[in-house]
Image (cartoon, rainbow, N blue to C red):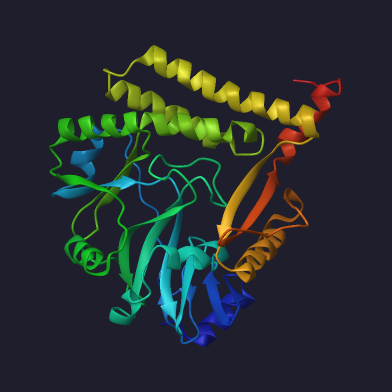
């Protein structure tokens, strides 16, 4: 619980923000308060939805496993999507983003993937899940596990107001009892099982998967390890934003890829290098083509909503947070079958300006 006096002081100091979504008044923490991390959500009665913690990354299985794990762990597939926490409050299901906002898109679509009855049996349950697929409003890339639209993958469970996660045994039991859609589990391993995990990660790499999250049964020891192919996929998806993203976005992925190749010498380095170059140039080439054709560089997102009101709330959120960087047609959203379709474009300002100037023949100085 966080007392109202604490919240009032935090808001005054810019450490928390009061927000409203439909009938729900709530607060999101911009900084850690009372032991709860940034991204935590305070509900009307003071109950706290804890923020989802960052998970450390290991770059090397051989060095990282014995250093980070001292007991057996589960290997869970890391899904390339966006993180949400789903709960029911006052009879309504809400999905909160990692930053602590109610996500209108995820809140709208959650009933497509989970039975609301789970909250009848477990009223304080919180589902930590990834929403992934080609039709999300947040990501340029996707996962090979979802061919169209989006899907939901639950990877952790929490109790409202209780720090930490349910253990893996209880989590699996609740998954089965309530038909919750899980992130794929690829086995139970010991820290010494480096060869077996190496073979698994190479198989996932060949399938186009992002990687693994490794978790002990109580969840206290956990780490993520990604495939080399996911680094190339990220670069391909975001190459058109080369001048709009921090340089570390690309250098971190290049470093991960180099370490991945060193740890897995059976990989074809020449083919990987060719794929990397093709990914970067293809993305940049598309940016040049877009600049020539329409005078700007951006990415068009397409997503579906069950309710028109949810789509309009999402549009308002985009306009509030994205401002001039977001272009939304006046006919949006429009009905498409059983859903309301929303298409919008995020414009990459720096790439747009640089290419526009270059293609216009202006002087540019290195």
Residue at x-position 52% and y-position 19%: 277
Viewer-proximal residue, 260 or 1? 260
Query: 96 above or below 138?
Result: below
From where the camera sits, is residue 82 visible? yes
Specify the quadrant of the image occupied by residue 281.
Answer: top right
Q: Is residue 20 left or right of residue 255?
A: right
Indicate the position of residue 94 as horizontal and vertical percent values.
48, 72
Q: Is residue 102 left or right of residue 85?
A: right
Specify the quadrant of the image occupied by residue 239.
Answer: top right
Residue at x-position 47% and y-position 15%: 274
Query: 256 above or below 158?
Result: above
Image quadrant containing the C terminus: top right
Indicate the position of residue 75 as horizontal and vertical percent values.
23, 46
Image quadrant containing the N terminus: bottom left
Q: Is residue 72 left or right of residue 200?
A: left
Indicate the position of residue 80 as horizontal and vertical percent values.
43, 45
From where the camera sits, is residue 38 visible? no
Specify the quadrant of the image occupied by residue 207.
Answer: top left
Query: 129 above or below 251?
Result: below
Query: Residue placed farthest to the front in the image?
Result: 337
Residue at x-position 47% and y-position 42%: 142
Residue at x-position 65% and y-position 68%: 313
Say how many tags the image has. Answer: 0
Viewer-proximal residue, 224 or 343? 343
Viewer-proximal residue, 73 or 94? 94
Query: 256 above or below 154?
Result: above
Indicate the position of residue 364 as horizontal and vertical percent values.
81, 22
């Amino acid at each position: 619980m966080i007392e109202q006096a604490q919240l009032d002081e935090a808001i005054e100091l810019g450490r928390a923000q009061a927000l409203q979504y439909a009938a729900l008044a709530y607060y999101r923490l911009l900084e850690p308060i009372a032991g709860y991390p940034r991204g935590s959500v305070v509900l009307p009665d003071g109950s706290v939805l804890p923020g989802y913690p960052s998970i450390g990354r290991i770059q090397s299985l051989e060095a990282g496993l014995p250093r980070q794990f001292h007991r057996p762990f589960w290997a869970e597939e890391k899904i390339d999507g966006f993180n949400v926490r789903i709960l029911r409050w006052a009879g309504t299901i809400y999905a909160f983003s990692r930053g602590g906002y109610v996500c209108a898109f995820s809140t709208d679509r959650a009933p497509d993937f989970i039975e609301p009855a789970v909250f009848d049996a477990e009223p304080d349950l919180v589902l930590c899940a990834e929403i992934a697929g080609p039709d999300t409003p947040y990501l340029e890339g996707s996962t090979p596990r979802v061919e169209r639209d989006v899907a939901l993958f639950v990877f952790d469970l929490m109790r409202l107001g209780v720090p930490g996660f349910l253990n893996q045994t209880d989590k699996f039991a609740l998954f089965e009892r309530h038909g919750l859609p899980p992130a794929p589990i690829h086995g139970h391993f010991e820290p010494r099982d480096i060869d077996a995990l190496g073979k698994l990660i190479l198989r996932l790499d060949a399938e186009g998967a992002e990687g693994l999250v490794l978790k002990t049964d109580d969840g206290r020891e956990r780490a993520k390890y990604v495939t080399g192919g996911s680094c190339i996929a990220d670069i391909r998806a975001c190459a058109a934003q080369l001048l709009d993203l921090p340089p570390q976005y690309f250098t971190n992925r290049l470093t991960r890829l180099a370490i991945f190749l060193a740890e897995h010498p059976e990989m074809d380095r020449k083919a990987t290098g060719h794929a990397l170059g093709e990914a970067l140039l293809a993305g940049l080439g598309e940016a040049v083509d877009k600049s020539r054709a329409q005078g700007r560089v951006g990415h068009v997102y397409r997503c579906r909503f069950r309710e028109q009101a949810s789509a309009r709330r999402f549009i308002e959120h985009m306009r509030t947070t994205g401002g001039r960087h977001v272009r939304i047609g006046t006919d949006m959203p429009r009905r498409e079958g059983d859903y309301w379709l929303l298409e919008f474009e995020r414009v990459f300002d720096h790439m747009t300006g640089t290419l526009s100037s270059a293609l216009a023949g202006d002087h540019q100085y290195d």
